[in-house]
Amino acid sequence: MPAKKARRDATSYEYVPPAFHPIQLSAPLAAIRAAVFGTTPDNYFLNFRARELLRYIHETDLAQYIYALDKRVTYWPEYDATDFTATKQVTLTQTAGQPRRISVAGQFDVNNASGRAARQYTVTLAPGNTTLFTTTITELNTTPVVPVTATFNDLNTAPAIAVPQTNLKLRFSNTSAGAMAPESAIITEVGDIIIVEDYDATAAIALENAAGGPEPTLFSAGRWALDVRAQPPAAITTILPILELLGEPSVLALFGAASSEPYTTFKNLWFDHPLPAYKLSGFVLAFIYRCNEIYENNNV
């Protein structure tokens, strides 16, 4: 199972010991992981889903099984300020050029099958000459990279440009944000989307210096970092029906063929408990314990 790299400033980052080595799951257990987290999840999806599932366990009397493995739990109780306050969020951070606003329209959703909840892009506005502008949106961390480009003559009539892999569209405004205070931010809410715009009134200097000196046309250029993320839907409504359809090999790999604790308890919770939170907690605990067994066996 490949490791997921994360920075300390990543959403809901938890400390990972430097000596940790990813484990290799069997095919039946890998099928369970894919059902829970998606086939190629990003860190935002992984952290959100793990936090959600562990919350189910800690809000029941089953938390003892977590502490039995390791009492050094750092994520619970949860902090007052959470990284998942917005259902959907678009963040535009201008990194170069004259501060200029970009309007955002449309929608985007989580891909539950793959586990993609967050995407990052670079947005550029470049003048080809005194009257021609070119906008390019490039998604990061993808293969192959297929930029989306639009060319237009006037910022007043700039076309809306589609953001790859979403139903969002961006449109440049001819209105500068230069009158704002340095490092100002604008936060707006459109439907269920929180839009955060960060504009630095000194960003133009970076572009001028990078180009070797000030030129009039450079003040019409700019560069932005675009971050798009959405919360995955509730696990009980999306994962539970999928897990109930898993085949016998996955069920046997998870709970075992013979009766042995704590797997018997986990199995009884999964098959017999009437409350969905307990059912899902029994399933997740069994998966945690199986993964822990593999990890410990690899480090004997």
Image (cartoon, rainbow, N blue to C red):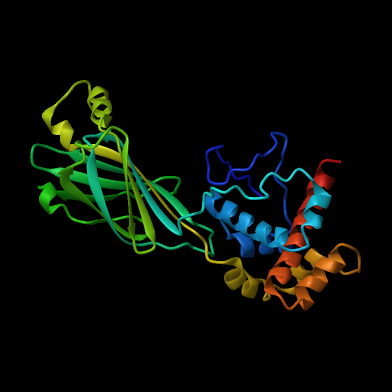
Most extreme residue toward the left, as rendered? 131
Give the quadrant of residue 211. top left
Residue at 13% in and 47% down: 155
Number of disc labels: 0
Q: Is residue 42 visible?
A: no
- Picture coordinates of residue 26 (x, y %)? 74, 58
- Picture coordinates of residue 69 (x, y %)? 81, 49
Q: Nearer the viewer, residue 29 or 99?
A: 99
Q: Is residue 25 visible?
A: yes
- Picture coordinates of residue 67 (x, y %)? 80, 51
Residue at 46% in and 53% down: 118
Task: Give the left or right position of residue 280, taking residue 147 as reference.
Answer: right
Most extreme residue toward the front, as rendered? 80
Task: Give the left or right position of residue 10, taking residue 78 as reference.
Answer: left
Give the quadrant of residue 178. top left
Residue at 13% in and 33% down: 217
Q: Nearer the viewer, residue 272 or 226?
A: 272
Q: From this view, report whether residue 293 is shown above or below residue 38.
A: above
Q: Quadrant of the C terminus?
A: top right
- Picture coordinates of residue 299 (x, y %)? 82, 41
Residue at 27% in and 25% down: 210
Q: From this view, report whether residue 231 is shown above or below residue 12.
A: below
Give the quadrant of residue 96. top left
Q: Nearer the viewer, residue 91 or 188?
A: 188
Task: Give the left or right position of residue 115, taking residue 290 as reference.
Answer: left
Task: Give the left or right position of residue 96, taking residue 53 as reference.
Answer: left
Q: Nearer the viewer, residue 45 or 133?
A: 45
